[in-house]
Amino acid sequence: MRACNTNCVEKPISIGFMKLGLFVGKHPWVFLVLPLILSGGLGGGFYFLGEREASDIEDQFTPVNGQAKTEREYVKKYFPHSDEFSQLRLYTEGTYASVIVQSFSNKDLLSKDLFRNVINLDHKVRNITSKLRGSTYADLCAYTNGKCVSNAVLDIAFKADNTSIDYPFHRGEFLGSTIGGVTLKPNSKSIQSAEAIRLFYFLNDAKTEKTDRIENDAWLQAFIKTFSKETPDEMISVSYFTSISRQEEFQRNTKTVTPFFSITYFLAINIAVNSCLRLDCVRNKVWVALAGVFSTGLAVLSSFGLLLFCGMPFSIPVASAPFLILGIGVDDMFIMISCWQRTKVHDKVEDRMAETYKEAAVSITITTLTDALAFYIGLLTPFRSVQSFCMYTGTAVLFCYIYNITFFGACLALNGRREKDNRHWLTCRKVETPDRNKKSNACSVGGAYDSQTGAEEIIPINVFFKTYYGPFLTNIWTKVFVVFLYVGYLAGSIYGCFQMKEGIDLKNIAPDDSYVATYYDNEHKYFSFYGPYVMLIIKDEGFKYWETSARENLNMCLKEFESSNMVTKNMTLSWLDSYEQYGAFTGLDISDKNAFMRNLPTFLDNSGFYPDVNISSGKILASRLFIPSSNINTATDEKNMLNFFRDTASTCGKNMDLLVYHPAFIYFDQYAVIVSNTIQNIVVATAVMLVISLLLIPHPLCSLWVTFAIASVIVGVAGFMALWDVNLDSISMINLVICIGFSVDFSAHISYAFVSSSQKTPDGKAIDALYNLGYPIIQGAVSTVAGVVVLSAAKSYIFRTFFKIMFLVILFGAVHGLVFIPVFLTFFGVCGASSVEDEKPQTHVDTPMSR
């Protein structure tokens, strides 16, 4: 039964490539020089690299249209920052410096001896001067009541002496975020001892002048420099942080991997050269291998330069792209060399090039399409860092393809002319052809070939796959073992998927040795119980605050919030509750609309709640309350808190339009989209890859094995990356999309080789497919892993994550291509039947290649 015929796709591609190969073979110097000129011109785009660097963490690692960003604009409009500073009421993180002072040996930091060190530390901070205009903290600080905003913990502890300090509130001051490691006195709310104190130094960022913002940054820089040189104290330890720290440390990530580029190129060159080494001094492909690596470098230069010219932002994750491109870029080189080796050595060079291009056409086109499309599908994600990475990498893959059929093809043709003249690969001097009847030095003779086929001699590793590995894999007991092995792999993968964690920890954005990591660790250790105060905003302009039923409705809503263990009980800050108490104390009937609105401005001014109510033309446009969160320790807690607050705000109460917001929600928004977008990208990419495989593999049922392999590799990568401490975030999302392109390369080509084999039995087809595919799969896998392996030593979570997932993708893809899929294909006779039984046996199949 004849299978579906895809010649309508394959044949035009093969014919077109054959003509191109013939032309390249005749005019190699043209195709050698033009790519060099093009690369030189496009490489000029790197002049704009500094301008195109996109290192804003919020912009790159949070959803483009995140809900919290819209909510922030609402808060900014109705509750703008006032002249009187209030950390509670900030709609951004603010501009600040912070230190966490920790006592050694769990000693009480509030004791007189230790607290004196805290006071001295505070004096040191206040004496720091910027290098720009010599400003001190007093010159730049945020103001409240005409004074620099102070740290309440210092004032309270300094004045307390032997009197007790209540926790978490002391005389109206909330200390939960500034005193940590607290032990309370028995049956009391008073502090017995504390292990840590956190101090904040907020600067005035309300000024719009650029010079003022620059001066603020200069002071923060001086703050960082001062504490980076701080000598260890015997009694306390200090960790520090500023509002610009994450950004600066994030930008330092790129510098941590720059030294690895030379190592990567060294590995890539060695692998390419060693895999192309031949004992024959004429047939040696050393120069061709070097040309393949150089061609990949040109592709990176051209693609990156072009996009920089076009104004494409260059995000930090893109710095890992050259490692990947270098690894996968030489794969097409292996295809071309493999096809060249099967052409007849006595044919004209241009004819050999035509035959090489014809045979390689489908393989290199398919691998390029699958990889490039996998990257471009990543543009659907709402994370700019992912979009930037996918655009740069996908374009680089296309340039690898273009330069492979032009620049590398020209190098292959020139090398072919040397082989045609039987010249030595190093000296280019003519050498004698080997004579079996005569003993000769291997360095002085060369140009051997198979007299039966007229092509170059088969390399030993291909013989290994045909004679040893293939028969071993198709043995019945080996098949049984492979099935059990796959079941174990699948079970481990599924278990890992249930251990998956979501979201990127902001600490991981900085390098491992960054002071930011230490600060975050201490913050989590001492100040994680009391979370942020979340704004609950009443957006409804028609809300009747003076009506008892409306207030009861709001109180019911607040009780619904407080019913969760993620909210601290009886700590909600409400101007409306305070106004009710004020009315009860003064005898004011706030149930009367006129009395309510007439006395409200005076109350707000005197109580300090005036920033929480927006009144215009005698009407309340919006107001806000503050709900305290608690027990927010992990990324899962952050996700659950965000969902709980938003869900409760949308469902609680009757006919109320509520909004919840905190600046941290900007980053928490990733949890709302990361899973759905990852699934969306995987589904779209899988569908596209399946269409491509249907065009490639002339048997629809066998194409389903491609879909199976894609799903199997994705499940494996997702499961084992969770077991390898990798979260599902915008960084790993990139790699999960990439793995679709790589997994289809492995599975589609092994299936194509199986179906196209002229062998009559399923086992014979599997052995034949491994004979043609085994070495190319190993070459592609090793070269790709070598391109990213150095990133395993990087001091950055971003680049280590990239290595981990790429390693899993290549490992599982190669195992599927070399073990699972060949065995599974033998179980189904329909895929084992000859695709075209009445045709003459094929002498070979299109050289398939995997990545």
Image: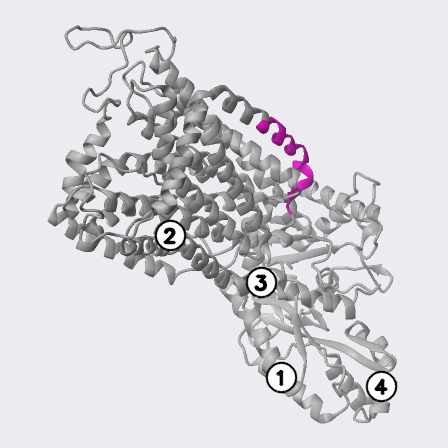
**Disc 4 to disc 3, how far (Cα)?**
37 Å
Residue 668 circle label: 3
Q: Is residue 429 visible?
A: yes
Assess whether residue 159 is covered by the magenta stretch.
no
At x 39%, y 46%, the residue is 742
| Residue closer to the observer: 172 or 300 | 300
- Find residue 102 and report its horizontal and vertical position in percent: 60, 53
Observer-side mark, 2 or 3, equals 2
The quadrant in which the N terminus is found is bottom left
At x 27%, y 12%, the residue is 446
The span picked out in magenta is 38-55
**Disc 1 to disc 4, how far (Cα)?**
23 Å
Label located before the other in sequence (4 or 3): 4
Q: Helix or strand or loop: what does disc 3 sit on?
A: helix
**Disc 3 to disc 1, how far (Cα)?**
23 Å
Find residue 391 and report its image quarter. Answer: top right
**Disc 1 to disc 2, how far (Cα)?**
43 Å
- Vertical side of 228 occupied by 179: above or below: below
Residue 597 circle label: 4
Observer-side mark, 4 or 2, equals 2
Q: Is residue 162 visible?
A: no
Assess whether residue 43 is covered by the magenta stretch.
yes
